[in-house]
Amino acid sequence: MRARTGRDYALFICVIGAGAATTHVFVPPTPGPLAVAAELGDAVDLGAMMLGGILVAIPTAAVSGILYGKWINARLDDIPLRETMGSTPEEVHERAERPISELPGVFEASLPILLAVVLVASNTTNDFLVDLAADGAAPFAGAEGALEAAQPATSFLGDPNFALTAAALAAAITYLRARSIDQSVWTDELTESLKSGAHIAAITSAGGAFGGLLAASGIGEYITDLVAVGAGGGVTVLISAWLVAAAIRIAQGSATVAMITTAGIMAPQVPDLAVHPVYLALIIGAGGNICSWYNDSGFWLIKEIGGLTQMETVKIWTALTTIISVTAFIIITVVASIVPLA
């Protein structure tokens, strides 16, 4: 789009980034929200988590992606197209000049994302239906045997490793078809892409190790005791959860690790909550999204794929994730105060 229009690059990145970042921390079946729901126990219904996550994600993405995107775009509208991970400006301009009919269609281009979501959701949905059948809920009463028989297949297909591998293969096949390149060149480019992603995987792994260290240190019990003093079980607990998730996110980088660690810390508060537990799960996601900077693999992903400088990435991506976090925090606390649903 930047090559086609010659403008609005920062706005395009903000809009795409806001949509991705909000669903990443609020809407199952992405790993973070799923893990938080599981950590907080049966009190967090997955369907309610999905619905609540969507209702929070839409206005949050609109405020951060569109409003902030337009504001920062007016100040960074001269970002040039640079060589990026696996792409050069010349290649981008060549693709932009192709007729639309020669490019992959909307469905084919979206297939890697849709495939991963559907596969992961198949396992999540089947587990949810098994629970409903076990409770005798209509219309699934009596179907428990059939649903349990399907669990081995859905567990295999819905495993994140399999789902993401299948999505990557779909993307690779589309790339091969659309570029019409020799298979040996295609193999070399796949190998190069794996090399380019290695440092991102290393940063993510280090963040996960640090999160495990925090959880094993006993800090969870300490923070739980602090939160419990005068908390009242309502909005104060939500504020505390947001602060804890934000602190862990800034310290070690990974939003998912921050969310899982905070959920473990806050889980003892669930029985005494004066608001619906879904609010707690959502606000943990909001805190875990704040301030993506140098220790977050997402920061480097946006920088490398977008062809941005470090300062441009801070102004666009770091600021965007912070605005998402604060906006969602305000929405969740206000709604929880008005409609606690306890």
Image (cartoon, grey):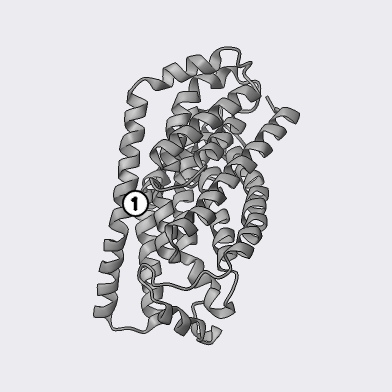
**Label 1 element class:** helix
Q: Residue furthest top?
A: 229
Frontmost residue, 308 versus 127: 308
Visible residue check, residue 139: no
Q: How many discs appear?
A: 1
Amino acid found under the numbered disc labelled 1: Asn
Residue 185: x, y in percent?
27, 79
- From the viewer's perspective, tell me whether residue 53 is left or right of residue 153: right
- Crowd rating for badge 1 (residues with CA inside 10 Å; few <14, some 14–19, many 20+): few
Which residue appears at 33% of the width and 22% of the height? 217
Residue 144: x, y in percent?
49, 38
Q: To which quarter of the image does residue 56 belong?
A: top right
Which residue appears at 29% of the width and 76% of the height? 186
Q: Residue furthest right?
A: 338
Q: Residue under circle 1?
A: 161
Q: Measured along the vertical axis of the image, is residue 95 above or below residue 337?
A: below
Residue 256: x, y in percent?
44, 41
Q: Quadrant of the C terminus?
A: top right
Frontmost residue, 240 versus 319: 319
Frontmost residue, 19 versus 170: 19
Which residue appears at 67% of the width and 56% of the height? 67
Which residue appears at 57% of the width and 55% of the height? 19
